[in-house]
Image: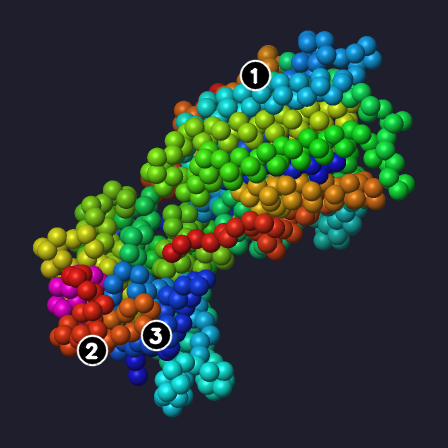
């Protein structure tokens, strides 16, 4: 019997060298789209991308590993504040450092934002560790409660810190988010999720989801892997939060509460727990849905909730069910070859 | 006081979790609807006197109507939204619960309008006529609340421990399949659980309305979360636990509010986390182990 | 030296004593059976070995103290004081594994199957086995995320091992089938195959012949012997089916109410009056 994975693998060097031309193409596309689309559509496009990052990352915990995390927005908030901290407070210092390193002025803003994003990911990852270590010892529903509690606690704590704006949040955050960053974020989160799933580590996560006891019996350190998945997901959530903050040009703690966590969980469940394709589609659909319902402004949220209930009743397993990754991933990759187009209808 | 309100609402959470292992997010909103039912009952039945005040018998009537209405709502929700999902993955049912909660909240905003409504007061409840016990002022309202809550709690204890349906409820919460094999109609029992829990929440709604003198459609949100925390603190699935949890939460919240108003929310969740880390089953909860 | 030794372990759940100062040993290369009436504590022994429960403190007495206790017909305080308190222990390969976590014990080379088959239901047969190969994987998560050469090499090895195992257990044609769709006999075989993917030195089989007809049972017996010979594992198995026990076990331990009441070759224990009494009417 032949082994399946005998394809030619593109060496990492080729990827690296193609970064520059790709970056140029992307930023050109971005500028075109920004100009061609109305500001409103463009914004929703950005929001979809951010939603995809949040949903796919949460899918790693809830879908791959089968855990109940419903406090994801808390990590987004940490990322938002961390990145904003850099771009708002540390900007002058950063500028000095970059000048000293002879970095040309045109490259500085994106580089600065890149640093901010890294800070966001790291900060959120640390938060993920702090939350995950105690919580992941708990069984099912208790874990859900714990993550919910932590998510709200994070928000409650930030609200009391006046240095970052307290209850009204941080203002004057620069508009650093653009098509390039969001696109890169979306692509990397999808690639990360896919690479994780199609690896022995991914199988360890699936094993935990299927039967934690049996997973332990075959040598999987379940606690360590749960924490790993949790921290990775948190880091990505941080990136999503940073992108959102720099799109809204501010961090408003109210945007990152339980309702936001719920939105993301809904995307993951709707798409089908464990399916990256599903998470992407659901994220886009659920970002566009409230916008499409704008004409019926007043009844918007009511319709949204009714639709939600109906969808759960009719397809409890989500749109893509628990499609096992080895087949689904091929489709995922082909579908995502084209960047998300504007005006995508509800899935 | 606040604790008894939380206790009443927490009971609903804990009971539903006990039989269904479901966290009924919509419960806080049932409480809100109960409050509004009481309001409309008072208005349309002309139970208020000229100054918008109720007499005790009128209060009783309103309570009963609100409880009945809330119970009906709870029953409806269970039937339509939760029953079909009995066998679905738990996260799905959770999302549905959230959906129902949102529906009630946003629907409420449309039907009841977002402006807060004034709530009828209890005769005798004017602040000037409060009791003064050793320098601590206790409003009549709080006393009434305490009494009502106590009566309801005692009634519940009797139902759960002394009647057959109560015994059935306990059986279902232990092992649903075994209970059905023993001839217990699980659907009926689950419906009953929702009815009782929702009725209590409705009562809580009326009482809170009376106390804070105004209600609005989003009141269920925060109260629901805090009551839920109370249920967890006391041990989710345990009825006396819900009562105890409610007390703990109410007291801590009032204490913190007096000293550090900003931190009230943080403290609420801090307590939750503390309990989950140190004693996940809650103060009175049962063991949480899995059989190999 | 025995491959694995259980040294006077006591396990109690609340007031119920599941194991009462039980001692057993299995030597390398043996096939040893564990039998006893239902509730005797057999699965508890397995759970003890795999780290799902920890042995409690117990009192043990030397022979003279025991004699004294019998003389006085009950254990006085004085006698009790002279009884030693010790923790039971589980020694594998000369190393105490009493306080190890289940996954660490699996990594050390002890694999098991479960009484109620515990496969990964929504994963394919292939992935079930590959998941068990993970324990010996050395590549890091970052190498998986970045798809380094090392990662591909290891994936290739894992795939090769898994394919080989499926072939040996004749599960090749079910390779992409979901584990939960497999017929019962194949599921049992898959569980054993998966256990072997962890390259164990000791394999614990919990009622492998449960629910099988005589033909399947015979095939299973052949399979177990082949596994022991070809994979060089030591086998410790729980069984109710006496044909299996008599047929392939070289030694047998008999458990009743948590105590080892008899131990020896199948013929010896079959005629042991205590064993017959314990089973009274069963089998």
Q: Is residue A123 left or right of residue B94?
A: right
Q: Is residue B240 left or right of residue B75?
A: right
Q: Pointer 1: what residue?
A: A293
Q: Nearer the viewer, mark 1 or mark 2?
A: 2
Q: Nearer the viewer, residue A119 or C46?
A: C46
Q: Which mark is residue C264?
A: 2
Q: Is residue C216 left or right of residue B26?
A: left
Residue C184's x, y, as percent? 21, 48
Chain assignment, label 1: A
Dot 1 and dot 3 within a common chain: no
Quarter residue B61 falls in: top right
Above or below, comparing residue B98 to residue B265 in the picture: above
Between disc 3 and disc 2, whose residue precedes? 3
Mark 1 and mark 2: Cα distance apart in space: 77 Å
Chain assignment, label 3: C
Which stretch is magenta?
Answer: C238-250
Task: Name the residue: 49% across, 29% down.
Answer: B192
Q: Which mark is residue C22?
A: 3
In the image, farthest residue toward the bottom: C64
| Residue C239 highlighted magenta (yes or no) | yes
Above or below, comparing residue A285 to residue A200 in the picture: above
Chain assignment, label 2: C
For disc 1, the neighbor class at 10 Å (few under 14, some 14 to 19, many from 20) is some
Whether residue B114 is visible to the viewer of this picture, yes or no, is no
Q: Secondary structure at mark 3?
A: strand
For disc 2, the neighbor class at 10 Å (few under 14, some 14 to 19, many from 20) is some
Q: Secondary structure at mark 2?
A: strand
Dot 3 and dot 2 within a common chain: yes
Quarter residue A297 falls in: top right
Residue B16's x, y, as percent? 52, 35
Mark 1 and mark 3: Cα distance apart in space: 69 Å
Q: Nearer the viewer, residue A12 or A213?
A: A213
């Amino acid at each position: 019997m032949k082994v399946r994975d005998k394809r030619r693998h593109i060496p990492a060097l080729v990827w690296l060298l193609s970064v520059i031309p790709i970056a140029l193409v992307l930023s050109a596309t971005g500028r075109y789209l920004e100009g061609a689309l109305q500001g409103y559509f463009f914004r929703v496009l950005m929001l979809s991308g951010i939603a995809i990052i949040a949903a796919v990352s949460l899918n790693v915990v809830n879908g791959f590993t089968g855990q109940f995390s419903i406090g994801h927005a808390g990590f987004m908030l940490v990322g938002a504040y961390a990145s904003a901290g850099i771009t708002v407070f540390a900007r002058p210092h950063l500028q000095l450092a970059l000048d000293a390193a002879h970095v040309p002025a045109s490259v500085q803003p994106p580089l600065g934002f890149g640093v901010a994003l890294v800070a966001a990911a790291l900060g959120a990852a640390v938060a993920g560790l702090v939350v995950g270590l105690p919580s992941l010892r708990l069984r099912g529903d208790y874990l859900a409660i714990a993550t919910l509690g932590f998510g709200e606690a994070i928000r409650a704590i930030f609200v009391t810190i006046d240095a970052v704006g307290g209850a009204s949040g941080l203002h004057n955050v620069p508009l650093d988010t653009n098509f390039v960053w969001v696109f890169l974020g979306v692509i990397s989160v999808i690639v990360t999720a896919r690479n994780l799933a199609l690896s022995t580590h991914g199988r360890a996560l699936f094993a935990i989801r299927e039967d934690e006891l049996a997973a332990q019996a075959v040598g999987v350190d379940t606690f360590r892997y749960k924490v790993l998945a949790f921290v990775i997901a948190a880091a990505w959530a941080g990136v999503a939060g940073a992108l959102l903050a720099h799109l809204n040009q501010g961090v408003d703690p109210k945007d990152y509460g339980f309702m936001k966590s719920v939105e993301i969980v809904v995307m993951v469940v709707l798409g089908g727990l464990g399916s990256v394709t599903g998470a992407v589609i659901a994220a886009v659909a659920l970002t566009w849905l409230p916008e499409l319902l704008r004409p019926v402004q007043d009844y918007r949220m009511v319709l949204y909730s009714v639709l939600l209930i109906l969808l759960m009743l009719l397809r409890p397993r989500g749109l893509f069910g628990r499609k096992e990754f080895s087949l689904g991933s091929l489709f995922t990759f082909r579908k995502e070859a084209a960047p998300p187009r504007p005006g995508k209808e509800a899935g | 006081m606040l604790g008894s309100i939380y206790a009443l609402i927490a009971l609903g959470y804990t009971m539903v979790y006990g039989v269904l292992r479901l966290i009924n997010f919509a419960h806080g909103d049932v409480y809100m609807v109960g409050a509004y039912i009481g309001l409309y009952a008072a208005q349309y039945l002309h139970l208020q006197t000229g100054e918008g005040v109720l007499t005790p018998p009128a209060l009783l009537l309103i309570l009963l109507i609100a409880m009945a209405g809330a119970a009906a709502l709870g029953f409806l929700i269970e039937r339509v939204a939760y029953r079909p999902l009995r066998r679905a993955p738990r996260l799905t049912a959770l999302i549905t619960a959230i959906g129902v909660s949102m529906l009630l909240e946003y629907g409420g905003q449309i039907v009841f309008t977002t402006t807060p409504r004034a709530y009828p007061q209890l005769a005798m409840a004017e602040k000037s006529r409060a009791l003064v016990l050793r320098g601590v002022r206790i409003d009549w309202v709080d006393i009434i609340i305490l009494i009502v809550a106590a009566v309801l709690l005692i009634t519940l204890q009797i139902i759960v421990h002394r009647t057959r349906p109560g015994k059935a409820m306990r059986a279902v919460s232990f092992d649903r399949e075994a209970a059905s094999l023993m001839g217990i109609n699980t659907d009926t029992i689950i419906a009953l659980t929702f009815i009782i829990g929702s009725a209590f929440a409705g009562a809580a709604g009326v009482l809170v309305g009376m106390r804070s003198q105004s209600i609005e459609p989003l009141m269920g949100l925060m109260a629901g979360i805090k009551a839920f925390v109370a249920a967890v603190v006391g041990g989710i699935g345990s009825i006396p636990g819900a009562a105890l949890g409610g007390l703990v939460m109410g007291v801590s919240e009032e204490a913190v509010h007096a000293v550090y108003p900003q931190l009230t929310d943080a403290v609420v969740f801090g307590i939750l986390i503390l309990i989950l880390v140190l004693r996940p089953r809650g103060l009175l909860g049962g063991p949480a182990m899995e059989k190999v | 030296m025995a491959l694995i030794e259980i040294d006077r372990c006591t396990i109690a759940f609340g007031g119920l004593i599941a194991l009462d100062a039980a001692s057993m040993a299995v030597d390398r290369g043996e096939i040893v059976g564990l039998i006893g009436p239902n509730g005797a504590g057999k699965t508890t022994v397995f759970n003890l070995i795999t780290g799902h429960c920890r042995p409690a403190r117990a009192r043990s007495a030397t022979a003279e103290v025991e004699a004294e206790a019998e003389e006085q017909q009950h254990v006085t305080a004085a006698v009790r004081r002279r009884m030693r308190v010790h923790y039971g222990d589980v020694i594998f390969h000369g190393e105490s594994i009493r306080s190890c976590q289940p996954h660490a014990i699996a990594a050390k080379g002890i694999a098991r199957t479960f009484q109620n088959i515990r496969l990964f239901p929504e994963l394919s047969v292939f992935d079930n086995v590959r998941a068990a190969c993970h324990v010996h994987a050395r590549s890091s998560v970052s190498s998986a995320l970045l798809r380094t050469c090392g990662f591909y090499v290891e994936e290739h090895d894992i795939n090769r091992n898994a394919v080989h195992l499926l072939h040996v257990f004749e599960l090749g044609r079910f390779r992409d089938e979901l584990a939960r769709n497999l017929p019962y006999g194949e599921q049992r075989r898959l569980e054993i195959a998966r256990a072997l993917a962890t390259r164990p030195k000791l394999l614990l089989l919990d009622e492998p012949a449960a629910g099988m007809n005589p033909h399947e049972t015979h095939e299973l017996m052949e399979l177990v012997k082949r596994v022991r010979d070809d994979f060089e594992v030591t086998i410790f198995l729980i069984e109710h089916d006496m044909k299996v026990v008599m047929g392939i076990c070289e030694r047998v331990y008999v458990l009743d109410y948590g105590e080892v009441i008899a131990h020896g070759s199948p013929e010896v224990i079959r005629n042991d009056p205590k064993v017959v009494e314990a089973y009274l009417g069963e089998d």
